[in-house]
Image (cartoon, helix red, strand yellow):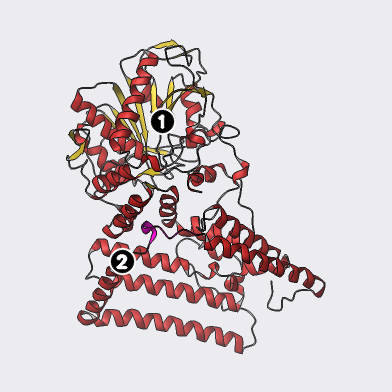
Amino acid sequence: MTTNTVVPSENREKLEANLKRIDELSQRLINALTARHPTPNALNAPDSTLYAKAAQAYMHEWITNPAKLIEQQVGYWGKTVTHFIEAQQALAAGKLEAPAPKPQTGRPDKRFQNPLWETHPYFNYIKEQYLINAEAIRGAVDLIEDLDPIEKKRLSYFSKQIVDMFAPTNFLATNPDALMRAVETEGESLVKGLENLVADLEANNGEMIVRLVDEGAFEVGGNIATAEGDVVFRNKMMEIIQYKATTETVHETPIVLFPPWINKFYILDLKPKNSLIRWIVDQGYTLFVVSWVNPDHGYRDTGMEHYVEDGFLKAIEVAKDICDVPKVNAVGYCIAGTTLSITLALMKKRGDKSVKSATFFTALTDFSDQGEFTPFLQEDFAEGIEQEITQEGILPHFIMARTFSFLRSNDLIYGPAIRSYMLGETPPAFDLLYWNGDGANLPGKMFTQYLRGLCQRNEFAEGRYELCGETLSVKDVDVPLMSIATETDHIAAARDVYRGVQMMGSKSKTFVLGQSGHIAGIVNPPGKDKYGHYLNDNLSESFDDWKAHAEYHVGSWWPHWEKWLKKRSGKKVPARIAGDSGYDVLEAAPGSYVRLKAAKQFQ
């Protein structure tokens, strides 16, 4: 694209035809927006008190330390004026090019990869002024000192959301990629983009939820979640899948794996080459995996106690019965890891020794540092969520999905929206993104218990969590355990996971720090050696010291875990066959519960 780009006359008719199609699509757009449900309370902006406190703190700084604020403002004005003068001088000199690019600091900004952001005076001016404005806003927030740390963290978060939202890449007139694509395709890209937008609105009752993936490219049980197994138990909370042995003999002690119920279990069985489920079975273990129900309005009064009693404890009982053993090895991932630790504390109170060892994947038990979720765990948001739950009986999946997305808004909201709506691209066929969008609703009572008792009041870590008639503490978790955290996890930060493990009462604790994040750090099969892991037996140190003294190992942590697990899994016995132990085969894996789509329940 150059400064004198002109649409060839022979293509103008096609352009005009595409613009007419846009007019026709506009009516569908209006209809979709008219059908839109009111914005859930949980997604509303924070109440005005946050901004009032910020303004008050800013004025306090102005009165007590005006020089600091004046310096910040003058710096902003100076950069803005200098930038304007440089652009004017370039134009006055007859240069149809931008000033020399400024040196970059930090990582390159993926939003501004098009060369026109540097070479074209119009786009360069807009980009540089946006970056100056963004820096000024961040600086203004950083300068505020007379503000509660939590409120300041929230202000920083919401100011970043505003900065990200107003990026020039998010608007057609200031996005060179979108403009170039529109000219090259005679407007076809804009028509396809509008079609994508209308389709997303119509599919989500008027909510603008960007499709991240081509949903038609995947079928659960067809080309994802294909490991062989059978559903051997079902109740209102879960199905239990017993996976088919691939070895003639297996370890006597079975594994019961509890995935999170925010998403579906098949993240651990996306495809054969990275399936943790297949890998565990191939190592010679009898594996049971829980597939949680996707709750509808009828689960309004389902609480944490139901997940513990009718989920965790029942699954352990079923696995023991089928395998005719006194104990199992249990694994919990994310929220299921948190709940596994609560279940273990309850089992100790009851004198139940059915779990030989526990493994935790990215599982929090100490919520004293709320981390990146701080903005969502304060009272105005909590009250909004409770209002939504009171009205609906559940927390709809898309609220949780959107919450997580806003933590990485450029990657998970604006970037996909630009590609779909402005560039007219078809979403990619990416199995991980398909799984990410195939989430589940949460029962109202359960989520309130989790939000209030664990996230806000941190009752389990402080030894005062009331559940099932007992007062439970993280110190009551006393079975041999291994906890795996990941280095860049923004959901369960590694240092927070580590702190919770330190609190547990077990005399045999192993902590592993994997590279990458919440998903890729766990789904990290041996062979590729893309991500390594860190080991250190000394859990008495602070997290920073633990990591500084840890030994780095190339490749997956899976073999290290299996070596640890093997010591706790007993002798080898003939491989078990589903249906031969008093529990009938109900249907083939992956079962029925996993196929229920959250989005379809409310249309």
- Look at the numbered disc 1 and give the secondary structure of its residue: strand
**Magenta residue check for 39:** yes
Q: Residue at x 37, y 68 (%)?
A: 159
| Location of the N terminus (image quadrant) | bottom right
Task: Give whichever of 384, 525 is nearer the camera.
Answer: 384
Q: Which residues are magenta?
A: 36-45
> Pointer 2: what residue?
47
Q: Residue at x 51, y 20 (%)?
A: 244
Q: Amino acid at mark 1?
A: Met
Q: What's the mark number on residue 238?
A: 1
Verify CB contact (< 8 Å) between mark 2 and mark 1: no
Q: Could one spot residue 252 in this view of the protein?
A: no
User: Residue 407 appears at what percent x and percent y?
Assistant: 41, 56
- Look at the numbered disc 2 and give the secondary structure of its residue: loop
CA distance separating discs 2 and 1? 38 Å
**Magenta residue check for 427:** no
For label 2, the crowd category at 10 Å Cα-Cα, with few meaning under 14, some 14 to 19 and many 20 or more, is: few
Q: Amino acid at mark 2?
A: Asp
Give the farthest residue toward the right: 10
For label 1, the crowd category at 10 Å Cα-Cα, with few meaning under 14, some 14 to 19 and many 20 or more, is: many
Q: Could one spot residue 411 in this view of the protein?
A: yes
